């Protein structure tokens, strides 16, 4: 499961969104290097064009980002193009340092893929304090992720000063924790901690409370955001995260009844052996659940170790809440170029109580590219539920297949940078892992299969 860690580190190298300070915006005015502000391009002899609306030169540390945005005459299409570099000057910029997206009625029609190096080109022919003129061309993915050829691209825009608006105010919502039964045979109170707030559930009911502030329950009002929580009954505990939404009441059940079998067991000494398809006979991974726990913040995680023939590969940390959501914790890590995770992250890799077709999300996450702040996220989709699967000649029942998309926000646009697919069998755990490093993500780059040698205690 450290595979997501490796992919997110790759994402840190390719992501190009920075937390920026606005330097300029672009508008149609008369103090310009060009007589009008327009954009245009062609794809398969079809012409697209329109006026430029807005754009920015953003700055962060030693890097700058130029973005030019516009719309079509009927306002149904939106156009965006941009580049980033240590200094925006006249010259040639190619992916991943160049960006292009085009949407119609909110649906993506074309986008340059930052993972395909040098596939899309933006040329700034003129830029000064008044405005910018340029051209662009190259390969872009359409909505079906087929590569299309963009030609005859042109853009021009005008600069003027930009003032950052003041936030309108602080939004907040409420959370209430409830339980059908109390702690132990005596139905004692259940202790709950939500972020920095703490309290108890003293009243128990068969259904959720009607309001968000009932007597005898633990409830809190908090600013909008995601908060960790832990509920304790003696030495037993349940952990999770709750999302507080504006003007909403989130009702969360605390249930200490454990399911008989997990899709990702963490019991002590459980172990699994895996091999890469097409790899050498010794190209294997052995995974062991150590039985040890480690606490990060207020969350407790089970510790796993991955080995190959050369010794330990990775130490990994997992937990599951009783809502059927499985998490991995990734500690902060920055390499010698100051790229990677500047803060620890926790992401969901499986939710076992969702029907096929359901989606779950994690993030956004803080990452760095050569010391500059960037952003990534992970979205999950339940592809299949309660199916049978054969791996390395052995059949497994009650399997959940999950797709994880590792996303980057690049110059204000979200793009899928990498893709993973994992298969989990109830009572066994991970049985197959597929990695997709290159768009359009139709053929996996690597496939890891369980060998049939495993033991779950």
Image (tube, rainbow, N blue to C red):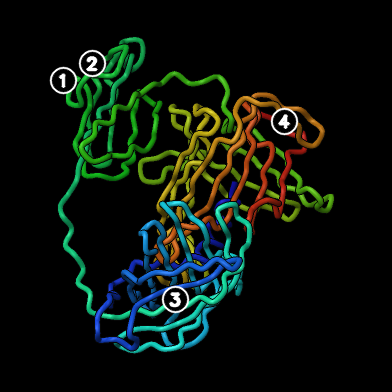
- The answer to whether residue 23 is seen in the rendering is no
Query: Which mark sits nearer the N-terminus, 1 or 4?
Result: 1
In the image, which is nearer the foreground, mark 1 or mark 4? 4
Q: Are marks 2 and 1 in contact (CB under 8 Å)?
A: yes
Report x, y in % for residue 203: 23, 16
Foreground tag (4 vs 3): 3
| Residue drawn at 47 percent across, 33 percent down | 325
Q: Is residue 292 above or below residue 70?
A: above
Residue 125 placement (x, y as % from top left) = 46, 88
Assign a secondary structure to mark 2. loop
Q: Are there few (<14), some (14-19), or many (20+) residues within 10 Å of tag 2?
A: some
Secondary structure category for the residue under label 1: loop
Label 3 residue SS: strand
The numbered dot on residue 226 is none
The C terminus, quarter of image: top right
Depicted 445 relative to depicted 303: above or below: below
Spatial CA distance of label 2 from label 1 is 8 Å
Label 4 vs 3, first from the N-terminus: 3
Q: Is residue 255 above or below residue 138?
A: above
Q: Which residue is mark 4?
A: 389
Using the image as rendered, state which of residue 357 and residue 407 is in the foreground. Answer: 357
Q: Read off the residue under disc 3.
A: 84
379 and 57: which is toward the camera: 57
């Amino acid at each position: 499961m450290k595979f997501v860690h490796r992919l997110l580190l790759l994402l840190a190298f390719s992501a190009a969104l920075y937390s920026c300070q606005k330097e300029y915006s672009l508008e149609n005015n008369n103090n310009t290097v060009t007589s009008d502000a327009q954009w245009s391009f062609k794809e398969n002899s079809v012409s697209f064009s329109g006026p430029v609306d807005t754009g920015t030169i953003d700055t962060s540390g030693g890097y700058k980002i130029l973005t030019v945005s516009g719309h079509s005459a009927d306002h149904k299409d939106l156009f965006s193009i941009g580049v980033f570099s240590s200094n925006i000057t006249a010259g040639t910029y190619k992916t991943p340092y160049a960006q292009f997206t085009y949407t119609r009625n909110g649906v993506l029609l074309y986008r340059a893929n930052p993972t395909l190096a040098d596939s899309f080109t933006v040329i700034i022919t003129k830029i000064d304090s008044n405005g910018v003129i340029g051209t662009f061309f190259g390969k872009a993915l359409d909505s079906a992720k087929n590569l299309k050829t963009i030609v005859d691209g042109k853009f021009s825009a005008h600069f003027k000063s930009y003032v950052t608006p003041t936030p309108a105010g602080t939004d907040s919502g409420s959370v209430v924790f409830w339980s059908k039964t109390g702690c132990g045979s005596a139905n004692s109170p259940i202790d709950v901690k939500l972020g920095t707030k703490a309290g108890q559930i003293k009243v128990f009911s068969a259904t959720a409370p009607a309001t968000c502030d009932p007597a005898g329950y633990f409830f809190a009002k908090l600013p909008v955001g995601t908060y960790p929580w832990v509920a304790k009954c003696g030495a037993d505990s349940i952990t999770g995260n709750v999302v507080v939404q504006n003007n909403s009441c989130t009702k969360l059940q605390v249930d200490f009844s454990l399911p008989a079998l997990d899709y990702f067991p963490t019991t002590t000494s459980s172990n699994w052996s895996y091999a890469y398809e097409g790899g050498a006979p010794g190209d294997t991974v052995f995974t062991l659940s150590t039985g040890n726990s480690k606490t990060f913040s207020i969350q407790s995680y089970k510790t796993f170790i991955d080995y190959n023939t050369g010794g330990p590969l990775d130490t990994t940390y997992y937990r599951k809440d009783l809502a059927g959501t499985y998490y991995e914790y990734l500690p902060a890590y920055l390499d010698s170029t100051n790229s990677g995770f500047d803060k620890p992250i926790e992401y969901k890799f499986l939710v076992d109580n969702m029907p096929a077709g359901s989606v779950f999300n994690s993030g956004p996450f803080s990452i760095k590219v050569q010391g500059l702040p960037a952003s990534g996220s992970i979205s999950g989709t339940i592809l299949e539920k309660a199916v049978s699967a054969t791996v390395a000649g052995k059949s497994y029942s009650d399997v959940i297949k999950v797709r994880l998309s590792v996303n980057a926000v690049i110059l204000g646009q979200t793009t899928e940078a990498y893709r993973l697919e994992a298969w989990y069998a109830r009572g066994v755990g991970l049985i197959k892992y597929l990695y997709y490093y290159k768009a359009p993500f139709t053929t996996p780059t690597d496939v890891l299969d369980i060998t049939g040698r495993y033991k779950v205690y």
